[in-house]
Structure formats: structure tokens, C-alpha cells
Amino acid sequence: MSLCSAALAGQLLAASPALAQQDRAPSAAEEACTAGSGAYQWQLEKKLGLKEDGVQTTEDCVAIRKLQQRLGIEPADGKADLKTYRLLLVDEVRKNPNAQGRCPVREYRVTCVDLNRQILWVQTGKKVVFAPVPIRSGKDGYETRLGWHKIYLKRERHFSTIYNNAPMPHSQFFNGGQAFHGTESDLFKSGSHGCVNMYANDAKRLYELLKVGDRVYVWGTKPGTGKRDGGVLPDDVLIAQGFGSDGITEDPAVDEPLTAHDIAEAVRE
């Protein structure tokens, strides 16, 4: 090969990095990530700084799978599903869930239940002592009651006598028959009968933290219940808006104190 030919070949290679990229063999991680496009493809593409086209690529799949692995989501298959999207929203507010100032700051411990964003956290003063976790509150017609409450009854093992003997592990009752408790159901579908559902492990950790007499504050509106924005926006869109800067503004009413009848009903349930 002449010097001129060698120089020309070098110039062509330097000018064609795309060709070199195409010839590169995919890594083992890329070969294994084959999930197709998911329902929340473009939302996750935007969050992860990927090309926003709503179409799954190998790059998208690998990036989403890494996110799922970081968040402890199983299976970590790279699928852009609702669970991955919602848990990412929760993770983004982990350091300062009360940036909107909706949960009252007190010297004592307060469990903050944000129905707009469907998350819960615990704070003492401005310090977060239990990082935000996803929840599922009461569905339409069974809304979780708003305002100030107190934990008045704790039961590590509890079963509902009203709803098909449904297990309610690590129950902490705060208003009548409404309680925090764990569930094996999908947190991102439908709603509860008024209780605040959490992943079983989150409910256990919360049970170990809170004491009888601890205060609870609930505000907002679960998407799909009560008055919604003209009834035209999907529930997940309303939740995503809540994680933005606007949210749903309202002044929650304070519930009446528990009566002896309320407590008796809760124990019976």
C-alpha cells in the first residue's frame, strides 16, 4: 500500500465513527436486555435523559434496567412500566419530600400522608426520619380521612372481618377502622377501603418506628376520587403533576376526634 493510500484509509476511518460503532459487538448486558416498549416509555426516557421517542432501544432497555436495579425493582428487565415510573418519582423527592410545605412541621414526630402523590414519610421537625414510600389510599367512596389523627391501636397480625378476612399485617389504626398496614396487592392499581396500604416491608419498618399516640397528618386527593380536574386526566398523570411544582392545592378539613364507637368498630374489624 502506498503512503497516499494508507493516509486516505486513515482519514476514512477517522471520519466514520458511526461505521465503527455499528461494527462493535454488543456487550453481554446489551444482548440480555430485550424488553420491548412499555406504557411509560417516553416518561422514563425523559427522566433518564434518553432520546424521547417512545420507542424502546437497547440503550433505553439497559438504562431502565440499571434504574430498576438501583431502586430494587424485580424483575429488573428494562421494561418501562408503571411501577418503575412511580418508584422513580418517589425516589426523586427522597431527600426533601416536604418541599411544598404541605405537612406541618412540629417538634414531635409526624407521619405525613400525601394523597396527591400517593406517598408517605415521617418527620420530626424538618428532619425526615422515615424516607418517602409509595402507598395506596382509599378508592372513590372509601376515601382515607383527611386532617390530624393519632395512632391509637397497633396490631402486628390482624385480619379484616369485613373484607373476606383479608390480612392486614403490621396494622396501626389512626382513625376508626382506617390503618396503615402491609399488603401483597398491587399498590398502583385501584385503591383500598380507606386504609393506607404499603409494601409489606415498608409497613413493618413503620410499625417498628411509630408508637401509640404518634400524630398523623393526611391531606390531598387520591387521583380518581372525589373532584378531579374535569374528569379527563388519567390518574397517573394527576400523580405525576403532584410530583411537579404545582400539585393540587386545597385546605384539608380536620376530622372530629375518635369516639368510643369508632374504637370499638376498629377493634372489631
Image (tube, helix red, strand yellow):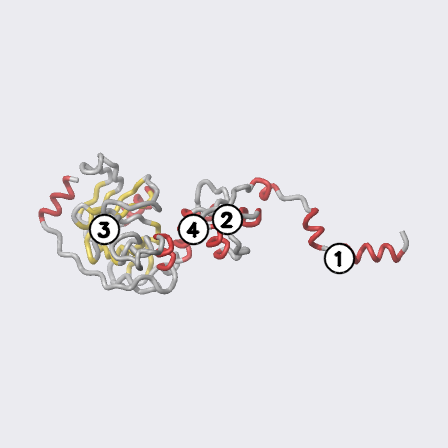
Query: Of the numbered discs in the image, which one, if any, rests on residue 64?
Result: 2
Q: Earlier in the sequence, mark 2 or mark 1?
A: 1
Disc 1/disc 4 C-alpha distance (Å): 40 Å
Q: If you read the primary sequence from the N terminus, does the residue marked by circle 2 or circle 3 appear first?
A: 2
Who's the residue at 30% across and 41% down the image?
183
Residue 125 % position (x, y): 29, 62
The percent position of residue 100, horizontal first and vertical second, equals 33, 64
**First reached walking from the N terminus: tag 1 or tag 4:** 1
Q: What element carries label 1?
A: helix
Q: Residue at x 44, y 44 (%)?
A: 73
Instruction: Identify which residue, 46 or 265, lies in the foreground.
Output: 46
Task: Indicate left or right for 245 with 59 as reference.
Answer: left
Q: Residues within 10 Å of mark 1 (few under 14, many from 20)?
A: few
Mark 1 or mark 3, which has the lower sequence index? 1
Name the residue tied to disc 1.
Answer: 14
Q: Residues within 10 Å of mark 3 (few under 14, many from 20)?
A: many
Q: What residue type is labelled 4?
A: Tyr
Question: How many other residues sit within 10 Å of disc 2, few (<14), some (14-19) or many (≥20)?
Answer: many
* Residue 93 position by quadrant: bottom left
Residue beneath disc 3: 143
* Marks 2 and 4, the one that precedes in the sequence: 2
Q: What residue type is labelled 1?
A: Ala
Q: Which amino acid does label 3 sit on?
A: Glu
Foreground residue among 87 and 200: 87
Near mark 4 (Cα within 10 A), the count class, few <14, some 14-19 or many ≥20, is many
Amino acid carrying label 2: it is Ile
As measured in the structure, the alpha-carbon distance from the residue carrying label 2 to the one carrying label 3 is: 34 Å
Q: Mark 4 points at which residue?
A: 85
Choose mark 1 or mark 3, whichever is in front: 3
Q: Is label 3 in a helix, a strand or a loop?
A: loop
